[in-house]
Image (cartoon, rainbow, N blue to C red):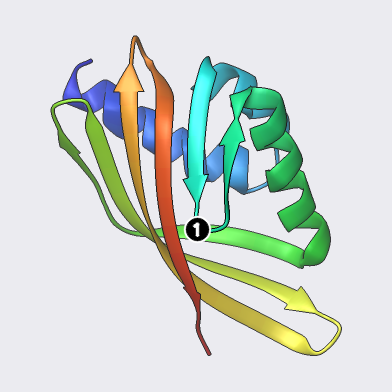
Amino acid sequence: MAATSAHELYRRWLAELWNGNPSAAHDLVAPHFVGHWPDRDVRGPDELAAIIGQTQEMLSDLSFTLEVGPIVEGDLVAGRWTGRGHTPDGELSFFGNDLLRVENGRFVEYWTASSAGS
């Protein structure tokens, strides 16, 4: 995959998928996608859409902003982001890093690390 295409794919990952349209998972990830969260693996676009939907239900006005990247090297794409949303107790910020593997124009594997901010 060309670097510009991988850049665009990651920008869509944040802008479309995480910022409000979990069903975009079907366009962005392959059927055999595996996402590695610290506490579980998520398989396929349906399960990915479900977990993103759960995240969006926990916080109102949820948004993700790209801070660094995407950085593309071969079939890997990396990015650093900031997430913000509101809970009944006020605003919540969190930060994370993504590493994704691309195959045939879609993401096939994902590793994430995130932490709460202030």
Which percent across, then down, holds residue 85? 68, 71
Q: Name the quadrant containing residue 21.
A: top right
Measured along the vertical axis of the image, is residue 14 above or below residue 65? above
Q: At 53% from the left edge and 43% from the top edge, which residue is drawn?
A: 15
Residue that extends furthest to the top in the rendered view of this protein? 104
Extreme residue in the left direction: 73
Tell me if 104 is positioned left or right of 50 in this view: left
Query: Residue farthest to the right?
Result: 88
Circle 1 packing at 10 Å, graded few (<14), some (14-19), many (20+), is few
Residue 108 position in % (x across, y down) = 42, 24
Quickly name the residue at label 1.
38
Quarter of the image with the N terminus is top left
Residue 37 appears in the picture as rendered: yes
- The residue positioned 50% from the left and 84% from the top of the image is 117
Q: Residue 36, how many percent across, how many down?
A: 47, 44
Which residue is at a point 43% across and 53% down the rendered structure image? Answer: 112
Does residue 116 appear to the left or right of 48 in the view shown?
A: left
Q: What is the x, y in percent for residue 66?
A: 39, 56
Secondary-structure class at tag 1: loop
Q: Residue at x 53, y 90 (%)?
A: 118
Residue 30 appears anywhere in the view: no
Residue 79 in the figure: left or right of residue 53: left
User: What amino acid type is highlighted by mark number 1?
Assistant: Pro
Q: How many numbered dots are placed on residues in this image? A: 1
